[in-house]
Image (cartoon, rainbow, N blue to C red):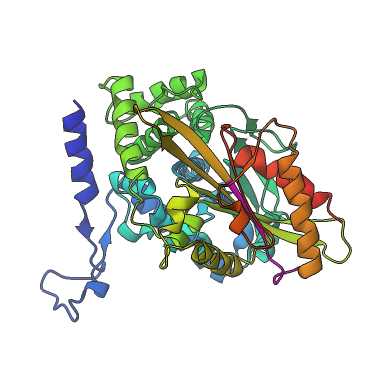
Amino acid sequence: MKALRTIILAFLATSRVVAMPQNSLPNQKVLDASAKHVKALGVGHFSEWSRATKKQFLVDWQAGKESEWIIVEGNEGGDLDSMTAALTWAYHLEHSSENTSHPIKAIALLQTPSHALDLRPENKLALDNSQMTPGHEDLLTMDELPEDPETLSRKLQGIVLVDHAEPLRKWSHANILSIFDHHKDRGTAPDAKPRIVEIAASCTTLVARQMLDELEKLDQEYHMPHELLELVLSAIAIDSSGLTSDKTTKADIEVSKRILARSNWKNDNLEDVMEDLDDELSKAQKDIDHLDLRDLLRRDWKGDLIDTPSPRTPTVSLGFASIPYSMDEQILKTDFAELFDWFAVHAAWTAEAGVDISICLNKYKKHYKGGKKEKIREVVLTVRDDVRIDQDQADSLFKTVKEALEKNDEGIELVPWHRAHELAPRQMVWTHKSGAGRKLFRPIVEEAVLGWE
């Protein structure tokens, strides 16, 4: 069973057609056979729809018709869950309204640059399995937006948030039509419809459930491509460890059953399918040893601007990175394999990102004699003085955030890193053994910044 599905997935990932111009004739002479003139396009309805939607969005933008469009956007981390949720809801909005008097134009936006997409190999694998065009040409990414979000957001019909409960500051002027999130409700856009904030292993679960509920109420169901259904199952599988993790909810299981029943795997056992997908995607997810430090920093990067009460510095830029390697391991990935080089590479990246405060959250497993493993996490705090704040302000802000982290109300005991004594001013590294990650530390840091004067 597992071997057969692996063969099928491998075949789908390598099956491509070469696109020829529509006016080409069989005997038409090829003027230039170089690779840049021959593109392998994705196969199937899902790829065709995604590519056509991207083209139409850009055509309409050029014609000044932005107000006709809804952007469905995931978070800037760009994981498989966020990407799939956005694609699924955009597809549903368009197809569920196509035979009505008010058809909807909707497009999924990946809030990550195109050059960062392959830093998540599990995403690439899932898209390949879904027969999408290589190189992510079917997808609209942040660096392909033809206009700054702060300007574009005012022109759109609206946006839909998936896998995050409030918009980044640059989208704050947009009309928020709907919200789907599986974390803490932040009270954003209380009048949004649908507005679903519910604990689940995967946000895709919530989006797919709403999609199926609405689809089954239509007089005539629209075509649901198997590639999209299998992408949905992939996102739920990797977020729920194949429906076996402690995070798995009844909703994750029930939605997976409903999606499976419509997929090409409808005759297979749900547990087997989800286990196979999780095994395959998790293996790909861990295949990042070749990435250097800069790639690790930007691979899972989330940031935003925060307004402060300080009249001198009303806005501060905050960025978070999540890295599955220890600080010591990351240092070995730099050119000189030295502590100073880690901070040099980090400084170059945060300068490019225009960040004042950076938090790196590292996690790894420490091995002991006898085969015992212990999960260890690290928190790296740095504050720059060359973006929006001067040296005195940076010193003050560093102190404020450092104290907030060390005196947190969550019961997390932060212990200075074993080389903390070697750090420069406005640099700090701690270790801890709690399971706390970005979702817990980010509010602590944001509240500290909001209270900084």
x and y percent of residue 10 in the render? 20, 43
Q: Is residue 359 visible?
A: no
173 with respect to 239 (left or right): right
Question: In which image quadrant can residue 18 be found?
Answer: bottom left
Q: Position of residue 165 (x, y in %)?
A: 65, 40
In the image, taking residue 453 as reference, residue 444 lies left or right, namely left
Q: Residue at x 76, y 44 (%)?
A: 404
Point out the stretch of residues depicted in magenta. Answer: 379-389
Q: Quadrant of residue 395?
A: bottom right
User: Which residue shows up at 21% across the image and 33% down it?
Assistant: 5
Depth check: 85 or 67 in front? 85
**Residue 336 in magenta?**
no
Nearer-the-camera pick, 236 or 17: 236
Q: Position of residue 451 (x, y in %)?
A: 84, 49
Residue 405 shows up from this direction: yes
Q: In the displayed structure, would residue 226 be above or below residue 37? A: above
The count of marks equals 0
Q: Quadrant of the N terminus?
A: top left
Extreme residue in the bottom direction? 31
- Left or right: residue 197 versus residue 220 is right
Q: Please name the residue shown 86% across and 67% down the image.
A: 312
At a point 22% along the width and 45% down the height, the residue shown is 12
Residue 403 horizontal side relative to residue 119, left or right? right
Query: Magenta segment: does it hold 384?
Result: yes
Question: Split into 4 quadrants, where in the image is the C terminus?
Answer: bottom right
Residue 305 in picture, x, y percent from top left: 71, 57
**In the displayed image of the protein, which residue is found farthest to the right?**
311
Q: Nearer the viewer, residue 282 or 19?
A: 282
